[in-house]
Amino acid sequence: MAQIDHIKDIARYGLENDREKLLNSLNEFIEYYRGTRKVNLALQLQSLVKESNRSSGYLTKVGSDHYFSRQNEKEVSDLFIDKLKSDYRLENLVVSSEVKNELIHFIKENNSVELLQKFDLPVSNKLLLHGPSGCGKTLASYVIAGEINKQMYVVNLGAIVSSKLGETSKNLAKVFRKASQEESIIFIDEFDSIGKIRDYNQDHGEMKRVVNTILQLFDYLPQSSIVIAATNQENMLDDALLRRFDVNLEFSLPNKVQIEELILLTLKKGNFKSPSKTILSRIIKKCEGLSYYSIQKTLINTIKRSLFEQLDSKKIVQKINVSIWSNLIELEKKALKK
Ligand SMILES: Nc1ncnc2c1ncn2[C@@H]1O[C@H](COP(=O)(O)OP(=O)(O)OP(=O)(O)O)[C@@H](O)[C@H]1O
Ligand SMILES: [Mg+2]
């Protein structure tokens, strides 16, 4: 479509007061400018739309203002599992140096929004974390919330994804509006559940609508808010959605170095002594193939059992029983194979 046609559409829908179509046309126009060299104009238009969304709230009011806002609060709060402040820090997370570097950059950018805006540079504020279960995706989101010192809304995708046509998109819009107003972090765990809509509705139009809604919400996300999505089924995600994330990080099973780091970190928390180097490297070898979560679980259970073993002795030593640990690792491996 040529520039003149975009402008005509915008004028028509503006005059007809058709907000939805107007927004769609504006989006298309912004996309058009993104493809040209006038990226700045696209950004300016985007921020105009964002401001307007924020101030209008685009809801029809029924009843008194007070009732309306209480009702609205409740509806929105059902869509969140949690609203929290975190005091986790980067040192609580064990990851490869590549992932750590990316996280450091992400944190730095989001702690320097004003500086970037001064130079008309967009902030990378949409992050996708993917990889197997128990490898730190949720933990990483807490670390980011702690390092950026922002409030985090944990989205309840189970409550958001609805079998009712059009409802999922509406719920998503509510969530984003709330978090944007408060300049906070939206954490969407199990992001692949969006794919469930495919099963709920035979109608593929609904899936398309939800994906389009997310794309729009992402595009108009204020620079001072952040979206973090996590999934262990990255392949379930629509390509257009995947492309919209500024940063895409893979959280994998730990290698030997990371297993050792996790063990030492966990022992340090309770001031427990580390086993000798040879024993430690034997244990590390046994742990290969397990997730961070499983390894930490076997170690914490070992610590507890080692303490219980000493209940009758006069002085408790902060030392772990390695044979208990070896057994627990074997049990964990067996349980996971089932
Ligand atoms: N990379 C890591 N560094 C340190 N601790 C970790 C790491 N990964 C997992 N853990 C430990 O395991 C717990 C569970 O991990 P987490 O919930 O972050 O995994 P996840 O990748 O989100 O898994 P899921 O896909 O099942 O949601 C963490 O709270 C932490 O105690
Ligand atoms: Mg998780």
Image: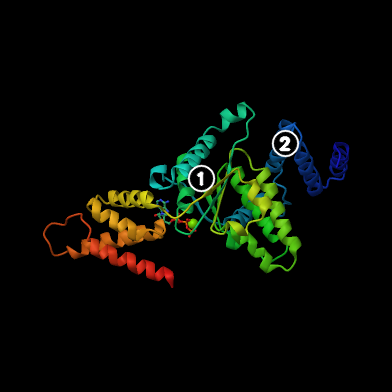
Q: Quadrant of the N terminus?
A: top right
Q: Residue at x 31, y 66 (%)?
A: 328
**Residue 115, position as x, y percentages in the image:** 57, 28
Q: Secondary structure at mark 1?
A: loop
Residue 151, label in figure: 1
**Residue 202, position as x, y percentages in the image:** 73, 69
Taking the view exactly as shown, the residue that stands out farthest to the bottom is: 338
Q: Is residue 316 visible?
A: yes
Work out whether mark 2 precedes mark 1 in sequence or the reverse, and give the earlier one: 2
Coloration mode: rainbow
Instruction: Between residue 251 and residue 266, name the one nearer to us.
Output: 251
Q: Residue at x 49, y 48 (%)?
A: 141
Can you tell which quarter of the image residue 52 is in?
top right
Residue 40, label in figure: none
Residue placed under numbered mark 2 in the picture: 48
Q: Secondary structure at mark 2?
A: helix
Taking the view exactly as shown, the residue that stands out farthest to the top is: 119
* Mark 2 Cα shell of 10 Å, populated few (<14), some (14-19), many (≥20): few
Quadrant containing ligand 1: bottom left
Disc 1 marks which amino acid? Gln
Please say if the residues under marks 2 and 1 sit with CB atoms less than 8 Å apart: no
**Is 45 located above or below residue 179 in the figure?**
above
**Residue 224, position as x, y percentages in the image:** 58, 38
Q: Is residue 93 left or right of residue 64?
A: left
Q: Between marks 2 and 1, how big is the CA–CA gap?
A: 25 Å
Establish whether ligand 2 lies closer than 8 Å to the Cβ of label 2: no
* Mark 1 Cα shell of 10 Å, populated few (<14), some (14-19), many (≥20): some
Q: Residue at x 16, y 57 (%)?
A: 316
